[in-house]
Amino acid sequence: MTVEYLSEDQIARYGRFAGEPSAQELEEFFRLDAEALEQAAAKRRSHNRLGFAVQWGTVRMLGTSLSAPAEVPSGVAEFVAGQLGIEDPSCLKVYPERLPT
């Protein structure tokens, strides 16, 4: 990505949350549509369902995925977990971990 036209502040903020998203931003970027709900439901474990859905919304909002998806603002994890019926959004911290196969 060419960044010559971006300010230093814009470069530093790229791909990061600048704080808790507003209620409008949560609805706009993290409201799961039928296809996203179906894809998330195909994941076996709750942390995988939540991690997938958080990344889906993050790409929509920031234009990129996060290398550490568990670092999303807590409001994002709670909003998405509620849509998936996941009671404990803190399970997201397990998402990047993978057991050897």
Image: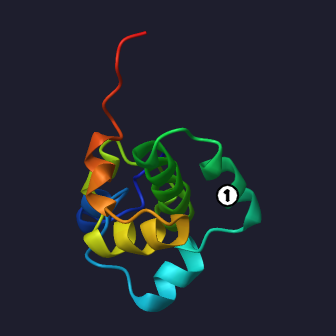
Classify mark 1: helix, strand or loop: helix
Q: How many marks?
A: 1
Q: Where is residue 81 in the image (x, y as percent from the top left)?
A: 44, 66
Q: Measuring 30% from the left and 51% from the top, which residue is drawn there?
A: 91
**Which quadrant of the structure image shows residue 36?**
bottom right
> What residue does disc 1 label?
36
Q: Is 41 on the left or on the right of 26, as rendered?
A: right
Q: In this view, does 87 lie above or below 68?
A: below
Q: Measuring 31% from the left and 67% from the top, which residue is drawn there?
A: 17
Q: Position of residue 93 (x, y in %)?
A: 26, 47
Q: Measuring 48% from the left and 82% from the top, which residue is drawn there?
A: 25
Work out which quarter of the rendered image holds the C terminus and state it: top left
Q: In this view, does 57 lie above or below 66?
A: below
Q: Disc 1 residue type?
A: Ala
Q: Where is residue 44 in the image (x, y as percent from the top left)?
A: 54, 38
Q: Is 5 on the left or on the right of 94, as rendered?
A: right
Q: Where is residue 26 in the image (x, y as percent from the top left)?
A: 48, 80
Q: Measuring 66% from the left and 59% from the top, which residue is drawn there?
A: 37
Between residue 32 and residue 66, name the one nearer to us: 32
Q: Is residue 10 above or below residue 100?
A: below
Q: Is 95 on the left or on the right of 64, as rendered?
A: left
- Residue that lies at the very extreme toward the right in this rendered image: 35
Between residue 83 and residue 67, name the one nearer to us: 83
Name the colour scheme: rainbow
